[in-house]
Structures are given as structure tokens and as C-alpha cells.
Image (cartoon, grey):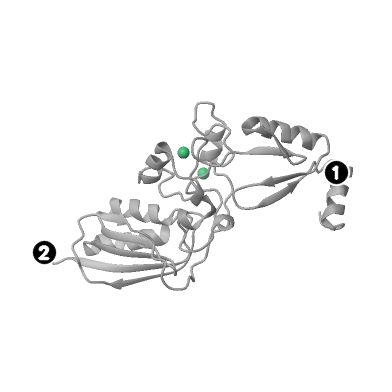
Amino acid sequence: MAPGYARSIKVRGTVQGVGFRPFVYRLADEHKISGWVFNGTRGVEIHAEGTPDALDAFAADIRSRHPPAAEVAQIVVEPAAFEGFGSFSIRDSDASGSPTTRISPDLPLCDDCLREMLDPDDRRYRYAYINCTNCGPRYSIIRSLPYDRPRTTMADWPLCDDCRAEYENPADRRYHAQPIACPRCGPDYFLRENGTGSARGAAAIDRAAALLGEGRILTIKGIGGYHLACDARNDSAVLALRERKYRKEKP
Ligand SMILES: [Zn+2]
Ligand SMILES: [Zn+2]
């Protein structure tokens, strides 16, 4: 094999849980780079092999085109030993060492997911836990680092075949989206009234909306934690919630 060029690229900052590895994977494909990327405890670690020009362009694009939710604090590019990788891959995370990488906050629903959630023909139609690499829960579901599904609160929901296919397809928006879920394999939702379950799925949401309309106070448990909810236009409901939380002043 002809001698080749290799570089080690270390990316520090808020770079986990924001679609960084899939982004690097697609970029490597674009620049004909081989090697690997993985989440380490200090950030994203990359080994890149290719022509000097391709390696320069690859590193420059990591700087300039990274996912919008990522906050890159530092990129360190150093020469590395050429090993002759035939392709580029996303490797398992390295969980050794104490974590210093920053975690992304939970991200609001993106336009693509919103469109799917409102599309009656989409398999996630009206599915409340819809998410992708550009949106969804992060900080609130992470139990430990590096950020991977087995170390999140989603570990208890094994992926169905459809979600697995999306998760493993580099061209898919949900490639390596750790909280990926759908109505078939992900969490369901149900309503409990006075200690007993009264409705599931869409019926639970309709019933919850009706209860809010009546001035009731609801506790909504998501993937990452609890929210308290009441009708903000209903003074007696707001007062009751403040009384119960001992917070008279907070908006
Ligand atoms: Zn999304
Ligand atoms: Zn699924």
C-alpha cells in the first residue's frame, strides 16, 4: 500500500447529542476520508485518512459546517500514524476516564419532526415523543456519559425494526439519534385520575386538555422529568397551583 496521510482531530465543547458523529460521517463520505469517529469522555475523537487536500477540507468543514445545536469550543488537528483504513465508521463510545465534555440541553421540536407529527400518513402521527438528531430530549435523559442510548432513560425501550433501520442509515435524519422512538417501540402515554388509569394514547391527551379546560392542575411526566400544567388564563387554577407549590410570586 502507498504511504498515506492521517490526522487526529479532537473536537471539544457541546458536541455530543447534537448529531455530530453522523455529521462527521457524512462529511468523511463527501471528502473520501477513511478512519473513524467516536464520542469520548472529553468530546468527539476523529481519526482521518486521505489526501492532504481532502484532510484540510475535511477539518475546515468540521469547523464551518457543524450541526447548529453544537457549540464547538476547540478543534485540535494533529498528524497521526497512517493505518490504511478502507472505510469510515462510527465506533462505540469510549467511557473510560472522567467526563469533561459538555452536554446539550433538551432541544425544541424541529420543523421536520413537527411536519411528520401532523401528517396522518406518517408512522409517528400525533406521537408525542417524536425526535431526531436535530431535536428532542438530551440533558434530561442522560444518566452518564458518553451520550449513548444505553446510558439514557430510553435504555428500557428496545428499537423496533423501522426505528433500527433509521438509526443505522447514515442518510437518515435519525441516524444515531439516541432517543429515537415511535408508537410501536417507544414510550406510550396514559392519564391517571385520582390514582387510577383512565385513558391511553390520543384519548389521554384529549382528556388532559378537557381537564385543563375545567381548571384542573395536571402533572405531565415526559421522558426526562415532570411538568406541572394548568390553564394560565384561569385565575383560580393558577392560585391553587401557587398555593400547592408555595410560590406566590413566580409567574
Ligand atoms: Zn426533529
Ligand atoms: Zn420504533
Q: Mark 2 points at which residue?
A: 2
Q: Is the C terminus in the top left, top right, bottom left or bottom right quadrant?
A: bottom right
As measured in the structure, the alpha-carbon distance from the residue carrying label 1 to the one carrying label 2 is 74 Å
Asked whether, in this view, residue 142 is left or right of residue 24, the answer is right
Lower sequence index among marks 1 and 2: 2
Disc 2 secondary structure class:
loop
Which amino acid type is marked by label 2? Answer: Ala
Asked whether, in this view, residue 16 is left or right of residue 208, the answer is left
Q: How crowded is mark 2: few (under 14 residues within 10 Å), some or many (20 or more)?
A: few
Q: Is the N terminus in the top left, top right, bottom left or bottom right quadrant?
A: bottom left
Q: Name the residue under label 1.
A: 237
Q: Which residue sits at x=87%, y=57%?
A: 248
Disc 1 secondary structure class:
helix
Asked whether, in this view, residue 24 is left or right of residue 4, the answer is right
> Can you name the residue that lies furthest to the front here?
196
Q: Which residue sits at x=40%, y=45%?
A: 167
Tell me where residue 196 sits by quadrant: top right
Instruction: Return the residue nearer the eye: 202 or 52.
Output: 202
Tell me where residue 7 sits by quadrant: bottom left
Residue at disc 1, CB closer than 8 Å to ligand 1 = no
Tell me where residue 43 sits by quadrant: bottom left
193, above or below 75, in the image: above
Q: How many numbered marks have been drawn onto this rendered protein structure?
A: 2
Which amino acid type is marked by label 1? Answer: Ala
